[in-house]
Image (cartoon, rainbow, N blue to C red):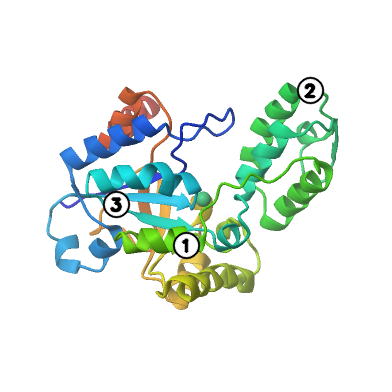
């Protein structure tokens, strides 16, 4: 049975971050060395269009990056070159155009960097435990961000925007970190044999959006931007934060994508699963034993044994 292991990375950098730690460069190299020694690594877009390869019964691995961080070209690309690996980079076109990070990263950054204590979040749609008027210390702000972020991901898109706008209007003392790639970087990656696909226009969570026209805009406009700057219509859409539903899958097909990427921490079985909810295994900055278990997929197996006992 052919099983595809799609490995998902985000930032790869020696920088440390308390709220969302990039993967350390040495750990990334360890991952690539280990994955390429155990599996045949192919470019996802080459694999997905090759039905004979896909259904050959062989197991493959692919390497993917979401969001489009500058550290991908600075630190990850040289390691990929060293091991002769081609990878796919899924980019948020507004983040590339404006050199601003995704809303999740901006949120974490502003709570860590601001010195403004007053923050009034009291929307009726939020449970009272998320209401605040004042976060006096950096520690209080970071702790609140840790609690708020996972909750924000569960909200409908329009409510999430209200909270994010309030935070942005309040924490005006934070400058935006310049950590995204530009179109020249992406052109260089493409020339090295890597693939550039879409991760939407704004990183909005597609499955939480109520307006289908807006979902379609996220899907088609990002593809058009990539085509305009890089000369190809991307075949793959990576759903931000793994959020999708049947509408998102249908619209992705309609707009012209050939496959859609979810997360799910699981292997992709091309015989059983849909091309518009392809599973990926995300790797983090964790101890090597844990990362190795994620790569072999034994961590999830152990977890499920514990869960179902
Ligand atoms: Zn993302």
Mark 3 against mark 1, which lies toward the viewer? 1
Q: Nearer the viewer, mark 2 or mark 3?
A: 2
Using residue 138 as the reference point, say whether residue 252 is left or right of it.
Answer: left
Nearer the observer, 221 or 247: 221
Numbered disc in front, either 1 or 2: 1
The picture places residue 276, in percent across and down from the top left corner, at 39, 63
Q: Position of residue 10 (x, y in %)?
A: 45, 44
Q: Residue at x 33, y 63 (%)?
A: 191
Q: Are marks 2 and 3 in contact (CB under 8 Å)?
A: no
Which of pointers 3 and 1 lies earlier in the amino acid sequence?
1
Residue under circle 3?
268
Q: Residue at x 36, y 25 (%)?
A: 306
Q: Position of residue 105 (x, y in %)?
A: 61, 43
Res 281 seen here? no
Q: CA distance from mark 2 to mark 3?
A: 44 Å
- Estimate the spatial distance between the alpha carbons at disc 3 and disc 1, rounded to whole Å: 32 Å
Ligand 1 has an atom within 8 Å of the beta carbon of the residue at disc 1: no
Q: Residue at x 52, y 72 (%)?
A: 225
- Tag 2, which secondary structure? loop
**Residue occupied by mark 1:** 184
């Amino acid at each position: 049975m052919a099983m595809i292991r799609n490995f998902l990375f985000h930032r790869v950098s020696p920088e440390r971050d308390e709220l969302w730690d990039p993967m350390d460069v040495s750990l990334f190299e360890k991952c690539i060395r280990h994955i390429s020694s155990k599996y045949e690594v192919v470019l996802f877009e080459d694999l997905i269009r090759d039905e004979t390869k896909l259904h050959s019964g062989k197991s493959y691995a692919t390497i993917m990056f979401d969001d489009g961080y500058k550290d991908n070209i600075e630190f990850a690309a040289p390691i990929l070159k060293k091991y002769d690996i081609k990878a796919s980079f899924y980019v948020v076109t507004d983040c590339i155009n404006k050199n601003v990070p995704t809303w999740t990263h901006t949120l974490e950054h502003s709570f860590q960097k601001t010195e403004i204590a007053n923050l009034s979040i009291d929307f009726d749609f939020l449970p009272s435990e998320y209401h605040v008027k004042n976060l006096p210390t950096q520690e209080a702000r970071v702790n609140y961000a840790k609690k708020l972020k996972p909750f924000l991901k569960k909200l409908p898109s329009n409510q999430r925007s209200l909270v994010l706008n309030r935070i942005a209007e309040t924490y005006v003392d934070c400058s935006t970190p310049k950590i995204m790639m530009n179109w020249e970087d992406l052109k260089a990656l493409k020339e090295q044999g890597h693939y550039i696909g879409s991760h939407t226009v704004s990183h909005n969570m597609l499955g939480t959006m109520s307006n289908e026209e807006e979902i379609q805009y996220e899907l088609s406009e990002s593809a058009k931007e990539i085509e305009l700057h890089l000369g190809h219509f991307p075949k793959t859409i990576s759903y931000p934060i793994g959020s999708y539903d049947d509408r998102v899958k249908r619209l992705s097909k309609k707009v012209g994508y050939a496959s859609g990427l979810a997360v799910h921490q699981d292997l992709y079985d091309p015989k059983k699963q849909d091309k518009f909810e392809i599973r990926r295994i995300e790797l983090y900055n964790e101890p090597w034993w844990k990362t190795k278990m994620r790569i072999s997929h034994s961590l999830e197996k152990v977890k499920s044994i514990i869960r179902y006992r």
